[in-house]
Amino acid sequence: MITVWGTPIVATVEQVINDLKLERFTDGLLKDINNTGADLMCTCPFHKGGKEKRPSCGILLKEKIDGMRKYEAGTVHCYTCGYTADLPQFISDFLDLGSPLAGFKWLVSHYNYSAVERAPLELDLYRGQAQAGTCMDDVDVEHYHHELLNSEAGCSYLYRRGLSDWLIDAFKLGFDPVDNVVLFPVRDATGKVAFYKGRSIVGKHFYNAKNVDKNAFVFGLYELCNKRFSQGRANENSEIWITESEIDALSLIDRGEFAISIMGSHISEAQCRALEGTQFRRYVLALDNDDAGRKGASQVKKMLIPKGFRFTNLQWETPAKDINDLVRLYGDNWKTYLKKF
C-alpha cells in the first residue's frame, strides 16, 4: 500500500507501473523495469519517443525525505531529460488524461474499491434460475452472446485482455449492457449453462450467481471434455493447466493450452469429485503469483495427490500477477517467464 495525496492506495508502485505498461503495451513504453530496492528504473516514455536504450527514469518505491522536502512514493524523475512529477501527474501525462486530478482518479478507480466491491456481488440475472439445480435457457445464452457481439465496449474489453474472436464464440461469452458486465458461462456436465460469472468492464466489480453454489462447478471442464479447439482434443496424457480465474484459463486456451478454472484460490471437494470423473490426471498449477495463489496450489495438491493426480509446479520469473497479465505483458514469449518443476 502507498499513500498519494494523503490517500492510501491499495497497490504497490511496481503494480501501478506494470498496469500502466499494460495500458499502452503496443507502444512498447516503460521497458527494462528494474527494481533497485529504492527505485524502479525504466525507460523514460517522454524523450526519444520512449525508445531510449538505457533506462534513465527513476520512480520512488517508498516515501523519501530529503532535508526539508518529502517525496511521495511514485515520484518520477528522469535523469536524462529532467522530467519530474508525482504519481498522479505522471499517470495523467502517460495516459494523456489532461490533468493530475484525472491521474489521481485513475489510481483510486483502479485500486481503491471498497470491501463490498471486493466481494462478488450476487444478482439474480447472473444465475441459472432462482432454484438450485436448474439451468439457463439456450435462448437466454444466445441473447447475452449477441449482446456482446453488438457491444463495442464489451468486445474491446476482451480484446484488451488478449482474447480472440474464435474463443469468444466457442465459449459463448456474453454481455449485460445495463450493468456493463462481461458474462462467463459456467456449464454443468451436460453442457447447459448453470450460471454466469460476471466481470464489470468499469472498475473491479465481480458478480457471482445467486442461489447457486459455484464451488460445485469447474469453469471450462465441459469444454475440455467435449470440445475440439485449435490444439485438438485433450486425452489422458494431456497436461491441463489449473487457474484461479476464468479469464486466465481462456488466455491459456487461446494460446494452445488445455486449461480450466476453479474460480478462486482454493478447490472444493465437489470440484475434486468433478475432476475425478474425467480421464485427466496431469495438471500444471497456474494459480495467481501471490501468497494466496501459492497456498491454494498447496491445497489443490493436498486434496488430489492422494487420488492419483500428478502436478507440475511453476516458478514465476516475473512480477506479473496472473496468467492473463503474463500473456499480455510478454505475448508469444510468455512461457519463458515460467519455470516448471
Image (cartoon, grey):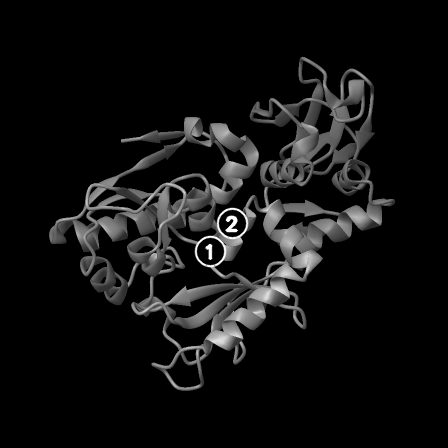
The amino acid at mark 2 is: Trp
Calculate the distance from the C-alpha at mark 1 to the C-alpha at mark 2: 6 Å
Number of numbered discs: 2
Quadrant (top left, top right, bottom left, bottom right) of the C terminus: top left
Report whether 268 appears left or right of 72. Answer: left
- State yes or no: discs 1 and 2 in contact (Cβ < 8 Å): yes
Q: Which residue carries the number 1 mark?
A: 170
Secondary structure beneath label 2: helix
Picture coordinates of residue 149 (x, y %)? 62, 60
Residue type beneath disc 1: Ala
Q: Answer with the quarter of the image where residue 312 lies.
A: top left
Residue 313 located left or right of residue 123: left
Mark 1, residues whose alpha carbon is within 10 Å: few (<14), some, or many (≥20)? Answer: few
* Percent coordinates x, y for residue 243 in the rendering: 38, 49
Q: Is residue 274 visible?
A: yes
At 65% from the left and 70% from the top, the residue drawn is 179
Q: Which residue does the image show at 69% across and 22% down from the upper left? A: 43
* Front position in the image: 313 or 223: 223
Residue located beneath label 2 in the image? 166
Left or right: where 300 falls relative to 126? left
Q: Is residue 135 left or right of residue 325?
A: left
Residue at (48% x, 27% y) in the render: 333
What residue is at 39 percent from the left and 50 percent from the top? 292
Q: Position of residue 122 (x, y in %)?
A: 51, 75
The residue lying toward the viewer, choosing from 190 and 251, is 190
